[in-house]
Image (cartoon, coloured by chain):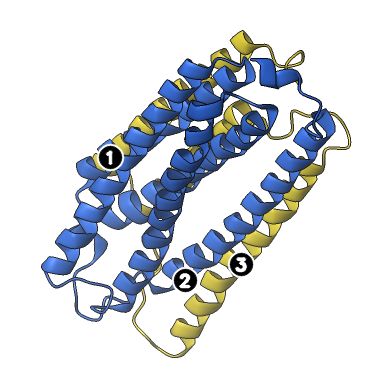
Amino acid sequence: MQQNHPWNREIKSLVASGVTSALLTVITYWGAISHALKVGELVAILLILTTIQAGVQLVFSMHLGIEPKPRWNLIFFIFTVVIMIAVVAGSMWIMYHLNYNMMMPMEKP
Amino acid sequence: MSHAHTADYDGEDVYAKTLFGFWVYLFTDFMLFATLFATYGVLYKSTFGGPSGAELFCLSYTLVQTFFLLAASITSGVGAAMAHRHQRVPTLVWFGMTFLLGLCFMGMQMQEFSHLIQTGNSFTRSAFLSAFFTLVGTHTLHIFFGLLWILVLLFPVWRHGLTKRCVRRLSCLKMFWQFLNVLWIFIFSIVYLLGGTT
């Protein structure tokens, strides 16, 4: 383990991950408070930037997917992401249409 | 460290298996938070005549919090790297920094919660606030246990030095803090930034 991950490389990848995360955090914050974007665009951009930031931290800080085969961590992770998207998107989709059909006021974001 | 070469069962194999087991735990925790995010996504407009996120959140305050947690995640990574090099004092110092940064984060979060409750906007006010307190409160609870865990693991390192078992446990602890930061950036973007500006 230590031979494969020398200390210097570990620190470098931590710093790279930290700097990228800090930059992305500042960009998302600025994008949100500047009110320069429409709501739909803002939602899309925030989701994309946050997903990139999460990916950077998972790979460069937590070393997800950087492991010898068989990559069980990565397989479990992909499965988890599929379930999470199904749960979150499915719930919101169902409840939005339920509210819509019940004539409850809930404007689309 | 003399302990590093004692003949115990703590080989590379156990290390890899333990870390894989910890990943699986983290994935189940991801799913827990996915359900809480789903609840929040369904209920965030249901303010029942009460205030919405835009009226409640102070975004610059939360930005400071976000940087505290990011710093905690990085210092825990450096701490674990020091532990792998069997450097006892730097390990203690870096994880000690993680503890302090995490404590600042949690203090700010408790301050925000108590401000909300004192101004009459507790979790009983509306479905939106119930979902908000459940999601962010569960994250804060994880932070609390992360802080406890640092103390529990650092004590034997301080008393007896860095055994292989300690290094393995500190690697899990590091992953836990980095996981908490990954979760938080989603809470920050979706709950605070989107809720606070739209």
What amino acid does circle 1 point to?
Cys
Q: Which chain is yellow?
A: A
> Left or right: where does residue B105 sit relative to residue B60?
right
Which dot, 1 or 2, sits closer to the camera? 1
| Residue A28 seen | no
Give residue A87's mark. Answer: 3
| Residue B167 seen | yes
> Circle 2 is placed at which residue position?
B39
Q: Element under label 1?
A: helix
Cα separation between marks 3 and 1 = 33 Å
Task: State the image quarter where residue B51 is shown.
Answer: bottom left
* Residue at the left extreme, as displayed: B119
Q: Which chain is blue?
A: B
User: How packed is label 3: few (under 14 Cα within 10 Å), some, or many (20 or more)?
Assistant: some
Q: Are marks 3 and 2 in contact (CB under 8 Å)?
A: no
> Left or right: where does residue B45 sit relative to residue B89?
left
Mark 1 or mark 2: name the one nearer the start of the chain. Answer: 2
What amino acid does circle 2 point to?
Thr
Image spot of residue B195 (x, y percent): 31, 57
Residue at 61%, 60% in the rendered image: B31
Chain under callout 1: B
Q: Is residue B74 above or below residue A40?
A: above
Give residue B104's mark. Answer: 1
